[in-house]
Image (cartoon, grey):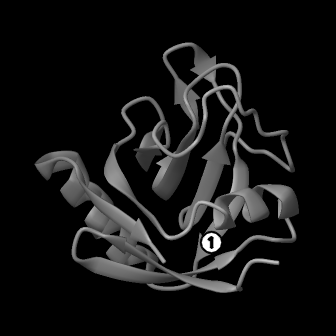
Amino acid sequence: MPSPLLRVTIGTESFDERFAMECAPNSCRELHGLLPYSGRLVHARWSGECLFAPLETQWPRTTLLAEENATDHPLPGEILLYAGETSEPELLITYAGARFACISGELSGNRVLVIDGDLKRLAKVGRKVLWEGATLLPIE
């Protein structure tokens, strides 16, 4: 079983997060298996006010993840894990209004993490990535 708390850093800002085991236990275990994670984070141009971390180097494209209480309308502070047939594997970090999508259309991702902290600070970081570009995303 994954440890309940993680530290996620977006650029220079760190956030405490907890696994959403009640929503997607299998997906949480899969994400836990990727930890510690270090990747790049960019703004999610198709999905609204959220950030996108492609997992192509950590997650084999042929490994699909079943939907577990999946959503296409994540709330601020929720992090979705997607590994389906329509788009590449990814993490989606929502900081304000969002509708999860890709060039092919709507996507649904599994809630795997929830930020326990200042959502206004998360929104500020999200807008910084929008205007200044990609940043690092370590998850420990």
> Is disc 1 surrounded by few (<14), some (14 to 19) or many (20+) residues within 10 Å?
many
- Say which quadrant the N terminus sits in: bottom right
The foreground one among 36 and 76 is: 36
- SS of the residue under disc 1: strand
- Return the x and y of residue 39 as percentages of the image width and height: 36, 54
- Return the x and y of residue 115 as percentages of the image width and height: 55, 76
Asked if residue 28 is positioned above or below residue 68 in the image, the reply reads: below
Residue at point 69% right, 43% down?
Answer: 109
Residue at point 72% right, 33% down?
Answer: 63
Asked if residue 50 is positioned above or below residue 4 in the image, the reply reads: above
Q: Is residue 75 visible?
A: no
Which residue of the protein is positioned furthest toward the top in this rendering? 104
For disc 1, the marked residue is: 114
Q: Is residue 30 left or right of residue 87?
A: right
Residue at point 31% right, 59% down?
Answer: 126
The foreground one among 8 and 59 is: 59
Name the quadrant containing residue 45: top left
Q: Amino acid at mark 1?
A: Val
Name the quadrant containing residue 60: top right
Residue at point 58% right, 36% down?
Answer: 89
- Return the x and y of residue 123 as percentages of the image width and height: 35, 65
Which residue of the protein is positioned furthest toward the left in this rendering? 132
Q: Is residue 40 visible?
A: yes
Tell how many labels: 1
Asked if residue 82 is positioned above or below residue 18 in the image, the reply reads: above
